[in-house]
Amino acid sequence: MEAAIILVFVMGYLAITLEHSIKIDKLIPALVMMAICWALIALGLESFPQWFDSSKHSLLEGFGAFTSDEKMHLMEETLLHHLGKTSEILVFLLGAMTIVEIIDYFDGFSTIKDFVKTKKKTKILWIFSILAFILSAIIDNLTATIVLISILQKIVKDRSVRIWFAGLIIIAANAGGAWSPIGDVTTTMLWIGKKVTTGHLIGYLFIPSLLCMAVPSLIASFLPAFKGDLDVEEVVEKKKSKFSSTMLYLGLGAIVFVPIFKMVTHLPPYVGMMLSLGVVAIFAEIYSSSKFSMTEFDSEESDAHAHHSPVHYSLSKIELPSILFFLGILMAVAALESLGILFGFASSLQDSMPQLGTEIHSGGVSDLVVLLLGVGSAVIDNVPLVAASLGMFSEPLDHELWHFIAFSAGTGGSMLIIGSAAGVVAMGMEKIDFFWYLKKISWLALIGFLVGSAAFMVTRTLF
């Protein structure tokens, strides 16, 4: 039965990557894959020798001796646990996307658009790469990607040019998320799991992460896609809302508030995001009646605005297929995790790999294993791989192994567009083809990953 579940997962992933060839939206195989994987688990529950306890990040002892009712109850609890964790991400994502759309409703991004005066592609590339690197460390790589691609869509109208910028934003956002305890879900897991502290994490990973962003951006600056200036259409723009700047700063400030709220209350990030959305929505409703005195009613969009509240209008603009795609892919990965398949993969990797390269002093785990974990995070979701490593290794707080895992899992996902949350959301927002990314961007991400890893091997000797 395990073989059948893995086969369904592989076929589903293949259908997602071949989306443009088979003309089926990636949302469909993701949902089908998730449903069939869990159906097979339910049907073959009696035959499974082990079960992974996600709450404790370890295999459950004595699972084989459980009765049928106990196993069924455990499966239902596990399914509910994973649905809860996935829903946290989806609700957080819905909140962030709604705030971004509310800002856009008030033409807020035109403030940043006006700020970016240059038409030179290389300068715009560096502006967005640096913004992605900094923002992802503050508001997490997923939200930073949503915000920056939304802004990018206002500045770069040609999609064939824009997806190049989006590819480099993914690399920069994942690099920026790796050195911050709130920048990436896997780094947050290690931080909450008391494996790393904020000071050491920044000390170990800031320079490797910076190089992981800067080297691909530098190489990309010399590529034909980033040569010359942007073609800007001369259009007569409608009069901007007088609240555009206010809503931009309020919206971005509300998103930045989320990690602060989390640190103070220790509540999940989605709770803070809902509070931020509520506050932004209050101001949006207050300002909306004044907005129309400042805009012209000569377009369909203005009519649409006039007949909707800002919140309702913004919610109608959200890309719901991307949300459901996330649900399918994360719950399918959860199915593999629950059977201990990913845990077994990580354990067998540790056992079978020769001890090549520099060994980590007390653990005896070669750097090559951690590097392969990074490569694996591009193919398989990095969350269960890091979860497996939490149960596999027993190194103390702030051991260099944990910091290398944080860097490797955080930045390795950039090598495939489906390898990170930032990549998946960019894929949904810009309809980026899997194979286009593989041919055009993956090699840049690989270079950044290897340069950053080499830099880490140097910086860790300083601690």
Image (cartoon, grey):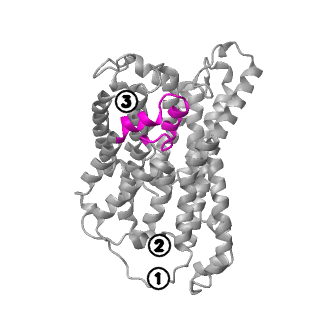
Q: Nearer the viewer, residue 441 or 108?
A: 108
Q: Indicate the amino acid at tag 2.
A: Ser
Mark 1 lies on a secondary structure that is loop
Q: Which mark is residue 110?
A: 2
Question: Mark 1 sits on what residue?
Answer: 237
Residue 282 in the image: state x and y as whole percent.
68, 66
Pointer 3 residue: 372
- Amino acid type shown at disc 1: Glu
Residue 450: image quadrant is: top left
At label 3, the amino acid type is Leu
Quadrant of the image occupied by residue 222: bottom left
Image position of 350 with respect to 33: above or below: above
Q: Position of residue 361 (x, y in %)?
A: 34, 18
Magenta span contains residue 314: no
Q: Residue at x 46, y 44 (%)?
A: 420
Q: Give the residue at the far left of this rendering.
A: 222
Sooner in the amino-acid sequence: mark 2 or mark 3: 2
Distance between the alpha carbons at the discs numbered 3 and 1? 50 Å
Position in image of residue 390 (x %, y %): 51, 25
Which of label 1 and label 2 is nearer to you?
Answer: 2
Decide which of 171, 139 is in the foreground and name it.
139
Magenta stretch, residue numbers: 178-206
Look at the numbered discs 1 and 2 and tell me whether their residues touch, using CB distance below 8 Å. yes
